[in-house]
Image (cartoon, helix red, strand yellow):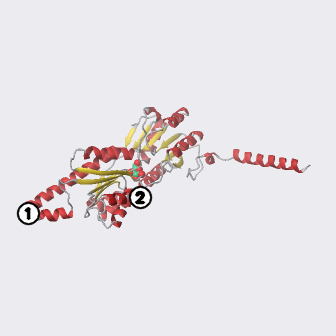
């Protein structure tokens, strides 16, 4: 056999091995490359593909855990988890991969609201029910998903505004009472807090733009803010729900504005970064500081900060949504009715109660 024929035969032989290995690969390896599933898919169980939008915050970790704890093998589920790493493109790939794997259900926690119709149509054509988690999608065709489980982000924003309204009222009545008894009190009180009916300068750290959490919380807060002529919103900027970006934007705010009274930070991670920025600038925030802090989520570390007096109030966003998802899938399996849109319960936590309230919490 001459050398040329030998090389061709070897190339042919190696090609055959590559094709055989590829075709024998288990389903799992055909998943999106970002998939973090550690176990093999068990098709005797209910197979669920879960596209989580990322791992940007403590809240997100608690939300992921809640789904993983609810959809366990013991409970009859085989879960394929995929991390979208803050990219809708990745999430769309995840969904297509789930469709390819013929899962029984798809859960999507969408990073932003628009642009889901095409891929959800593909899921529908494949006969796979889709459940939307945490945030919402913006679509004209509500039949593209069977259910949504999350929190009312608009109500959260409004609650933040109402809390500030109440806080400023309390400050004002404290100020009035003090003035009646002590005509010199004005100087002291204004020196310490400067908060009464004066202009209230507010900066907002927004979460990922066009996400339900950003849209809802901004709109909810603004709807209360417009009712108060003395609330002056100096800036809204995107801190992307991360500690690093929160710190970066807060540093910018501190360089630009020298009279910030209120920080509204749309999640705890951004708040942690912002507090670092405030402290590094040599300023004080929270209960005894000049800058009052309103945060969202109420994760465990935020309770530490409330106890330390660094955050005034935290509007909860409850990540424990797994049990409701499991319930809905059970209903679908049995052909039973369920609420299409469900919100999990939430509370508001103030610094003064943080020490006691935290004992009843699991994240
Ligand atoms: O969509 C929920 C928000 O997303 C949480 O407030 C935040 O921490 C997360 O990143």
Per the model, the C-alpha gap separating discs 1 and 2 is: 44 Å
| Mark 2 CB lies closer than 8 A to ligand 1 | no
Where residue 147 appears, as percent x and y from the top left, is: 43, 38
Residue 10 visible in this rendered orientation of the protein: yes
Residue at 18% from the left image edge and 57% from the top image edge: 171
Residue 320 visible in this rendered orientation of the protein: no
Q: Is residue 349 left or right of residue 104?
A: left
- Of the image marks 1 and 2, the number of the one nearer the N terminus: 1
Circle nearer the viewer, 1 or 2? 1
**Quadrant that contains the C terminus:** bottom left
The circle on residue 183 is: 1
Residue at 53% from the left image edge and 49% from the top image edge: 81
Mark 2, residues whose alpha carbon is within 10 Å: few (<14), some, or many (≥20)?
Answer: many
Q: Is residue 278 above or below residue 327?
A: below
Where residue 21 appears, as percent x and y from the top left, is: 72, 48
Mark 1, residues whose alpha carbon is within 10 Å: few (<14), some, or many (≥20)?
Answer: few
Residue at 17% from the left image edge and 62% from the top image edge: 190
Between 194 and 182, the one nearer to me in the picture: 194
| Residue linked to disc 2 | 243
């Amino acid at each position: 056999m001459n050398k040329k024929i030998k090389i061709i035969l070897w190339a042919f032989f190696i090609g055959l091995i590559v094709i055989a290995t590829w075709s024998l690969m288990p389903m799992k390896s055909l998943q999106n490359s970002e998939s973090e599933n550690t176990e093999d898919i068990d098709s005797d169980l209910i197979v669920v593909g879960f596209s989580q939008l990322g791992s940007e915050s403590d809240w997100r970790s608690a939300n992921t855990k809640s789904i993983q704890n609810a959809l366990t093998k013991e409970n009859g589920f085989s879960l394929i988890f995929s991390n979208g790493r803050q990219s809708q493109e990745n999430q769309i790939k995840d969904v297509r991969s789930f469709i390819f794997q013929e899962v029984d259900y798809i859960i999507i926690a969408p990073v932003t609201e628009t642009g889901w119709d095409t891929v959800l149509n593909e899921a529908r054509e494949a006969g796979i029910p889709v459940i939307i988690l945490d945030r919402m999608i913006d679509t004209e065709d509500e039949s593209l998903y069977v259910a949504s489980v999350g929190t009312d982000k608009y109500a959260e924003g409004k609650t933040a505004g109402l809390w500030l309204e109440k806080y400023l009222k309390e400050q004002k009545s404290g100020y009035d009472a003090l003035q009646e008894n002590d005509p010199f009190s004005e100087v002291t009180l204004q020196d310490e807090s400067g908060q009464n009916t004066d202009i209230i300068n507010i900066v907002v750290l927004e979460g990922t733009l066009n996400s339900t959490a950003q849209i809802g919380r901004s709109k909810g807060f603004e709807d209360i803010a417009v009712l108060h002529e003395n609330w002056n919103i100096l800036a809204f900027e995107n801190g992307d729900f991360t500690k690093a970006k929160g710190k970066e934007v807060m540093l910018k705010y501190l360089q630009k504005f020298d009279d910030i009274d209120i920080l509204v930070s749309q999640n705890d991670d951004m708040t942690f970064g912002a507090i670092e920025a405030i402290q590094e600038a040599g300023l004080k925030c929270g209960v005894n500081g000049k800058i009052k802090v309103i945060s969202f989520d109420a994760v465990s570390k935020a309770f530490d900060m409330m106890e330390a007096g660094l955050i005034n109030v935290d509007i909860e966003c409850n990540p424990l949504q797994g049990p409701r998802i499991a319930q809905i899938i059970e209903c679908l399996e049995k052909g039973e009715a369920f609420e299409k849109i469900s919100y999990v319960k939430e509370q508001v936590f103030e610094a003064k109660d943080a020490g006691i309230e935290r004992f009843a919490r699991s994240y």
